[in-house]
Amino acid sequence: MIKILKFLLFIPLISFGQEKSETKSEYPNYVGDIEFNSEIDNKDFEICNLKHIYQYFNNSGALEYEGEKLAIEKEFAEKYKSEIIKNETGLIRINFVVNCKGKTDRFRLISMGENYEEKVFVKSITEQLMSITKNLKGWKVKKYNQKEIDYYQYLIFKIENGQLKEILP
Amino acid sequence: MRNLTYLFLLCPIYLFSQPNCNAYLYKGDTLEYKACIEAEKTEKLYQFQREFQETLDNAIKICPNFAYAYREKSTAYLKSGDFLTWKKLIDKAVDLDFSLNLGYRAWCRYQFFRDYNGAIKDIEKLDSLANYNIGYSSNGDYHLNITKGMCYSAINQKKKAIKIFNEQLETKDYLPGLYDYYQLGVTYYEVKDYSNALKSFRKQSEINEFADNSYYKCKVYKTLKNQKEYKKYKEIALELYAENKKMFDPYTRHFNSVYYETIKNE
């Protein structure tokens, strides 16, 4: 009987311990994870492997696009309407998912000024970049261990006084 | 024991990206040693994993001055293009230990963000603080002085870039890197010094031949109106490209690297 009582007294401790281990982490499962947001994302966008979305470099293939990055640069050179806007200088990153069929969604944007400080660029710049990025159709399907994968890709735009100077990676 | 001590001294603190914890112990810093032992738990984790970040946070809790943990935490942000988080973390690592992190930050600023001025500033600062060879990029492709030359070339200070490249290549006991003469050659080409450009591309071929180098030879011969050599090197460049013998980086593109279509349309 005493043994049973001792066991019952231990239960709250065990249960407390479990609660502690489930404390929400400040990190997502993987750095850079983009959670589905019903307000901005396409609900019909298919993620083929919900367990893991790779990074674009995980297959050692770097950025893979029909016609190489040159085709992306041409697309932006043709469509981005450059205006000289003083002090609109820094980097803008648009991050997104390319699924196992080469389709894209879950676009997110961050931006910085010349000293890596957070900066909000004027909409005429960011909206253009976002729109052109969303319309890029040449993303290649990547494979890992012979299996088609979903992967995160990003484009970084180097902007100097509103002019698009370089595209990375 | 003495031999063992020498061995520890010979090993850099970061050995193949994993720290040598005993080096901290030898320095007499037991807190950093304990933090390092904690950080070793990341060995089998993926840099992007939550547990990887959390383990390093634990290491920082043990020793808030443990620069290695900040640098390691920064890597996943760097590789995913999150310049905001990356910069905060790598700055902390540099503040705590410039000797192991300033050159690395310089390289990352150049490689991932084409922050040419920032990279130059970091390399020049490291050079002013260090009385030793400032070393190579983290992927080993370029000496940091060659990186500095590329950055000056990118901001259109071509003559300064050429001077830096040549000074590095003439440094006693320096072995030219895989792409050094190519970068020098392209810069000579850009200032229309075709004779020195060709000399550099030929030297590059002796060390490591790749499509981009042949393409620039073809460009020089085209400018010099030597049709025969122009066609020859264009063909070689296309062949090398098809064989995948080209400048390649798994994360970004090399400075002055060339696309297939550019070669084809030359």
Image: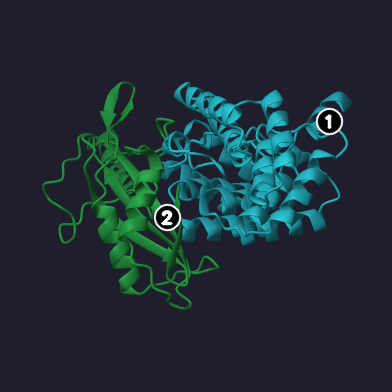
Chain colours: A green, B cyan
- Give the residue at x 63% y 41%: B36
Q: Secondary structure under badge 1?
A: helix
Residue B172 image point, x, y percent = 88, 36
The x, y position of residue B204, in whole percent, is 69, 30
Q: Is residue A7 above or below residue A86?
A: above
Give neighbour class at mark 2: few <14, some 14-19, many 20+ (Cα, 10 Å).
many
Vertical arrangement, residue B56 with respect to residue B44, above or below: below
Secondary structure at badge 2 equals strand
Mark closer to the observer (2, 1): 2
Seen as rendered, the residue at the extreme bottom is A86
Q: Which residue is mark 1?
A: B5
Q: Report whether A69 appears left or right of B142.
A: left
Q: Give the residue type that dot 1 points to.
A: Thr
Q: Are marks 2 and 1 in contact (CB under 8 Å)?
A: no
Return the residue nearer the eye: B141 or A35.
Answer: B141
Pick the residue in front: A33 or A122: A122
Chain where mark 1 sits: B
Q: Is residue B65 visible?
A: no
**Crowdedness near tag 1: few (<14), some (14–19) or many (≥20) residues, C-alpha within 10 Å:** few
| Residue drawn 70% across the image and 50% down it | B149
Q: Is residue B11 left or right of residue A146?
A: right
Using the image, name the chain to which the residue with label 2 belongs. Answer: A
* B242 or B170, nearer to the observer: B242
Confirm whether residue B246 shows in the render.
yes
Image quadrant containing the N terminus of chain B: top right
Q: Quadrant of the rendered structure where residue B202 is?
A: top right
Residue A104 locus on image (x, y percent)? 23, 46
Relative to B24, say whether A145 is above or below. above
Q: Is residue A160 left or right of residue B209?
A: left
Tell me the amino acid under the disc marked 2. Answer: Ile
The spot of residue A123 in percent (x, y) is: 31, 73
Residue holding disc 2 = A156
